[in-house]
Image: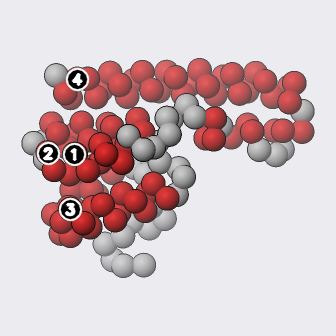
């Protein structure tokens, strides 16, 4: 692993990390890093949209555009592929698990609302 790669692709603090990569490796370096995050299957559209809004608010239009392009290709935070209750051991009793799935989905929907509100505030 190179010194300038996040260990284990940390999903916290993406904005400063993306700025650093853009400043040191340019647009191509940022595109490569964004594709690496996308390939993990753990990245979601809402968090990347939030990063794009932060970059835009800092007048960093080019990296914001690149992040926004990747965000458009990512699944929503509420996509069921992210639900931890759809894998064993939770799948052993689907009836008992229904409440967990519903609570997880409601939690994700609230999180999406908070992120969208922040994106709107940054864009306003």
Q: Name the residue: 89% across, 39% down.
A: 92
* Mark earlier in primary sequence (4, 2): 2
For marks 1 and 4, give the CA distance: 16 Å
Callout 3 crowding tier (Cα within 10 Å): few <14, some 14–19, many ≥20: some
- Which SS class for mark 4? helix
For marks 3 and 1, give the CA distance: 11 Å
* Mark earlier in primary sequence (1, 4): 1
Q: In this figure, which residue is indicated by the disc labeled 1?
A: 64
* CB atoms of marks 4 and 3 within 8 Å: no
Question: From the viewer's perspective, is the residue at label 1 or at label 4 nearer?
Answer: 1
Q: Name the residue: 45% across, 43% down.
A: 74
Callout 2 crowding tier (Cα within 10 Å): few <14, some 14–19, many ≥20: some
Q: In this figure, which residue is indicated by the disc labeled 2?
A: 61
- The answer to whether any part of residue 24 appears in the image is yes
* CB atoms of marks 4 and 2 within 8 Å: no
Callout 4 crowding tier (Cα within 10 Å): few <14, some 14–19, many ≥20: few
For marks 4 and 2, give the CA distance: 17 Å
- Which SS class for mark 3? helix
In this picture, residue 67 sits left or right of residue 11: left
Q: Quadrant of residue 34?
A: bottom left
Question: From the viewer's perspective, is the residue at label 4 or at label 3 nearer?
Answer: 3
For marks 4 and 3, give the CA distance: 26 Å
Residue most toward the right? 93
- Give coordinates of residue 26: x percent, y percent: 18, 65
In this picture, residue 65 sits left or right of residue 33: left
Tell me the tag on residue 27: 3
* Mark earlier in primary sequence (4, 3): 3
* CB atoms of marks 2 and 1 within 8 Å: yes
Q: Quadrant of residue 32?
A: bottom left
Q: In this figure, which residue is indicated by the disc labeled 4?
A: 121
Q: Name the residue: 13% across, 47% down.
A: 60
Location of the C terminus (image quadrant): top left
């Amino acid at each position: 692993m190179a010194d300038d790669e996040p260990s284990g692709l940390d999903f916290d603090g993406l904005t400063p990390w993306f700025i650093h990569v853009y400043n040191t490796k340019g647009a191509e370096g940022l595109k490569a890093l964004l594709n690496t995050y996308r390939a993990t299957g753990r990245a979601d559209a809402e968090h990347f949209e939030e990063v794009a809004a932060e970059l835009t608010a800092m007048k960093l239009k080019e990296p914001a555009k690149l992040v926004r392009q990747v965000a458009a290709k990512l699944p929503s935070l509420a996509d069921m592929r992210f639900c931890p209750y759809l894998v064993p051991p939770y799948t052993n009793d689907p009836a008992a698990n229904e409440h967990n799935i519903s609570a997880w989905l409601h939690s994700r929907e609230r999180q999406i609302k908070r992120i969208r509100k922040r994106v709107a505030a940054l864009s306003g």
